Image (tube, rainbow, N blue to C red):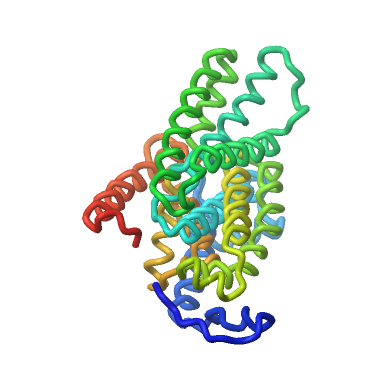
Amino acid sequence: MTATVRAGRPSRALDLLPRPRPRARVVVATLSVAVLVILSALVALSLGDRPTAPADLWAALHGRGTENTVYAVQEVRLPRVALAILVGAAFGLAGGLGQSVLRNPLASPDVLGISAGASAAAVGVIAVGTLGGPVGVVPIPVAALAGGLGAAALIFLLARGDSLRGRRLLLVGIALSAALTGFTQYLLTVVDVHDAQRAAVWLTGSLNTRSWEDAVPVALGLAVLLPTALVLAHTNRALLFEDDVVVGWGVRTGRARATLLLVSVCLAALATSAAGPVAFVALVSGQVARRLAAVPDIPPLLSASTGAALVLIADTVARTALPVQLPVGVLTALVGAPYLLYLLQRRRGSRGTAR
């Protein structure tokens, strides 16, 4: 992609950045997916062991109705639905930012090893407690965040000397993900049976028995990181151009990419700490959002909304439409794995050019 840079005063360089234009399709797509999330949330709140009628649901949300209905809606379903939306939004935004900055449709936290790093750290905290170490000294969200950041730092260290958009970064991430997954499996062998079973369910990506306490860290993270991503969206669009052109606009490409990738890593780590590594949500959400919007970049709000809809719908189906209740990660993996194969086949057909 090329652009013509006009000569001018350095203080006016940023004025040459491509200004975002009102894009009707992006707005319509974002609003449509947001409406889908709201409708899916109402359906999810209505479904359970005993389905709740719309009138009873409205009353239960306001604390009225039978005690059992109010408890089922407010204490069981509502925290789970809220967490599904928050986790999905965090994964969707993380995947969209990573794929947009690196200009690679495969650059998602689960493929690059960020989720694996967060998972290894979280299971490590469980293992330390099982083996007689200090329990609760490092909360799981903090451990997962540190694990995700550590994995990201190691990936970029091992891939140094190569462009952030090069193939080497992806290969290093896949290799590190495999190594961290193996380490996590080893940790499961040294903990007691109860903790191993609990961690194994968490590692598949599950929202079972989650409460408001699990949702708070993700909500706080999104409250800070989503506005940050929106503020940096203009810079993110500029990174679609070649580096020499962007530098001429006065943008420090290294700092801009590092900041956006840091936001992506933090979001993925927080979502993983709350629900486990829900597979392929980050990978699929960004690409679906890009195709819905039909634009070169990935709109942040749209990718977040797409992730929220994907996790919420998958969790609702996994807990209500099947003979047995499944972790949400199982269902997203069944959808995401074929999509990953499709992306790999498409990239091979285009001779490695990211689309």
Q: Is residue 336 above or below residue 39?
A: above
**Residue 263, located in which quarter of the rendered image?**
bottom right
Q: Who's the residue at 70% across and 38% down the image? A: 142
194 relative position to 211: left or right: left
Q: Is residue 14 visible?
A: yes
Please tell me which residue lies in front, 51 or 106: 106
Please tell me which residue lies in front, 239 or 37: 239
Question: x, y percentage for residue 193?
Answer: 55, 14
262 relative position to 161: left or right: right
The quarter of the image holding the C terminus is bottom left
Q: Who's the residue at 52% across and 54% down the image? A: 46
Which residue is at the far left?
A: 349
Question: x, y percentage for residue 8?
Answer: 61, 87
The quarter of the image holding the N terminus is bottom left
Question: x, y percentage for residue 79?
Answer: 63, 48
226 relative position to 179: left or right: right
Q: Is residue 69 visible?
A: no
